[in-house]
Structure formats: C-alpha cells, structure tokens
Image: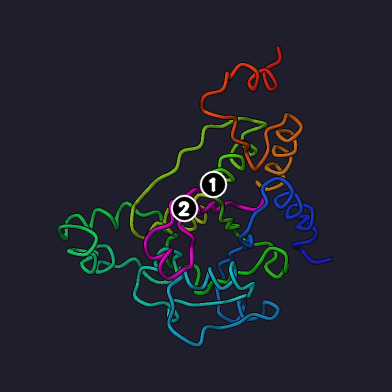
C-alpha cells in the first residue's frame, strides 16, 4: 500500500465529489519538491518541452490528465516560480516594474501588488509537480486544486462548514491570482478560493464560469461528509430554480419544517 492510499481513500473522495457536485474539470494535486531528482521519481511524470506559465502546467494535469513536473527554468518570467517559492523573491521581483503601465498605473502600484501576494518563501523547494488525484502518483499532494462553477463552489464550502463551523476569509490580489489559490494554500495550509485571473483563463484554459479552490487534502473527507449531510436535507447540486414570482413559503417549508 502506498503512502497516498494509506492516508486518503481517493476513490471515495472522488466518487463523493462526482456524486454531489458533478465536477466537469479533473481534480488535481500539486506537490513541491526540494530536489529535481525527487520530482523526477514520480511515476510517469512528463517534463515540459517548451516554456510555459504555471497556469499551463496546471491545465495539462486538469484538462489533459497528465502528470507534469517543472522547475523555475520551465516558466516564462519570474512570477510563476516566485509564487511557489521556486525562485527568489528578490528586489527586482518585489518592485514589479513589468506590471507598471500594464496592470497598474505606476511602479508604486505594481510594487504594492507584489507585496500583497501570498507566496511560498524561497529557499526550500526547487521543483513542483501536478497530477490528477485519481492517478495517486503524488503521495500525498501538498494541496488539491478543484475548479468549480459558483454554484458548485458554494455547496463545496457549505460541506466544509457543515461540522465545526468556521468563517472563511479569502483574498483577491487581482492579476496573478494564483497567489490567492495555490500560493496561499501552500503557504498557510488553509482552504483558499480564488477568482482565476486573465492569465489563468488565457493561458491556463480556465473557463469563464469557473472558480478555483486550492485546499490541503486533509480537508476533503470532511467536505464529502458535509455534502452527504446536506444532500440528505435536500440541499443538492444542481440547485433547482424555484421561480422568482412564486410564494417562497412552500419551498422553504421543505427545509425549515419546524
């Protein structure tokens, strides 16, 4: 039995996500490695043949079902590697001059954006890999990435909050919103929702109606249990439209019969 199978029943987790949320995008895992050699030991791992954005590497796992490993040298520019701590967040990166006049009016605005991003501290990791959770090749992944529609996402969060309720706060840095998803989740170990940015949609194939949840795998069994409980209460996906002119009392009475 591999380590991933020992700690997580991925078949049950993925079956639950399919049953309760009917996901259309493949749930994937992401893992950081201290050495390239360690990353290259992952079963059937592919290496990029071209220069990509990190969004493209993630998309190759999510949309094509590949297991892909990369280093900072495989990414275009400094931003992608810096978010995952694969390259230094040096003074040039912190200044963010490339973004001034493109995404932000001034260099000061760009610098403020860079400092607002949640990133993995540099120095420990040199490589990363992504792979479909169903492959069980990352054992276990550091985080899971799940693309969902807004309706699926709120039910996912409702499932997470079913037991041991906790308010969830998320951030929006704007462009480079991978810092809000995998950057934040890798750094804090907390569920991290993001609004995928222009680059993720243009280069990473993210659909215009998709949001991204980056979440450590330890949370997923709890989510599935919560979704199962909500389903028993009739709170399911897809959410049926009740009608904007109907008397709401009959519909609400089904859930709030007391």
Sequence-first tag of 1 and 2: 2
- Give the camera-side residue of 24 and 121: 24
Name the residue tied to disc 1. 190
| Label 2 sits on residue | 184
Colouring chosen for the image of the structure: rainbow
Q: Nearer the viewer, residue 135 or 196?
A: 196
Q: Can you say whether 24 is above or below 47 in the image?
A: above
Snapshot quadrant of residue 89 = bottom left
Q: Residue at x 56, y 29 (%)?
A: 243
Residue ranking furthest to the left: 106
Asked whether 61 falls inside the magenta stretch, the response is no
Kindly identify the residue that appears in the image at 48 percent across and 77 percent down: 71
Query: Which SS class for mark 1?
Result: loop
| Identity of the residue furthest to the front in this view | 245
Seen in the image, is 73 located left or right of residue 108?
Answer: right
Give how far across and how far down residue 135 sits, in percent: 72, 69
Q: Which residues are magenta?
A: 191-218
Residue 27 coordinates in the image, percent (x, y): 63, 60
Q: Quadrant of the C terminus?
A: top right
Horizontal side, residue 140 vs residue 143: left or right: right
Q: Give the Cα distance between marks 1 and 2.
A: 7 Å
Residue 206 is one of the magenta-drawn residues: yes
Please tell me whether residue 152 is drawn above or below residue 203 in the rendered image. Answer: above
Residue 3 as seen in the image, left or right of residue 107? right
Disc 1 crowd rating (10 Å Cα; few below 14, some 14-19, many 20+) is: some
Q: Residue furthest top?
A: 258
Q: What is the crowding at mark 2: few (fewer than 14 residues within 10 Å), some, or many (at least 20)?
A: many
Kindly indicate whether the residue at mark 2 contacts the one at mark 1 (C-beta within 8 angstroms). Answer: yes
Q: Position of residue 252 (x, y in %)?
A: 63, 20
Residue at the image position 70 percent from the left and 21 percent from the top? 254
């Amino acid at each position: 039995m591999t380590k991933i199978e020992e700690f997580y029943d991925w078949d049950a987790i993925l079956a639950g996500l399919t049953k309760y949320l009917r996901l259309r995008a493949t749930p994937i895992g992401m893992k950081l490695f201290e050495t390239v050699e360690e990353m290259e030991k992952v079963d059937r791992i592919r290496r990029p043949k071209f220069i990509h954005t990190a969004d493209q590497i993630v998309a190759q796992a999510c949309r094509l079902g590949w297991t892909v490993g990369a280093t900072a040298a495989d990414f275009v520019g400094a931003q992608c590697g810096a978010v995952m701590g694969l390259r230094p967040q040096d003074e040039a990166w912190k200044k963010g001059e490339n973004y001034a006049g493109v995404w932000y009016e001034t260099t000061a605005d760009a610098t403020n954006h860079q400092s607002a991003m949640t990133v993995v501290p540099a120095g420990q990791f040199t490589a990363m890999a992504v792979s479909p959770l169903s492959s069980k090749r990352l054992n276990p992944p550091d985080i899971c990435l799940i693309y969902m529609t807004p309706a699926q996402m709120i039910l996912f969060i409702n499932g997470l909050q079913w037991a041991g309720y906790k308010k969830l706060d998320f951030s929006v840095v704007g462009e480079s919103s991978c810092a809000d998803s995998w950057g934040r989740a890798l750094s804090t170990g907390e569920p991290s929702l993001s609004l995928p940015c222009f680059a993720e949609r243009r280069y990473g194939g993210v659909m215009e109606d998709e949001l991204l949840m980056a979440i450590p795998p330890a949370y997923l069994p709890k989510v599935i249990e919560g979704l199962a409980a909500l389903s028993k209460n009739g709170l399911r996906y897809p959410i049926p439209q009740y009608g904007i002119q109907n008397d709401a009392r009959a519909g609400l009475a089904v859930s709030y019969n007391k």
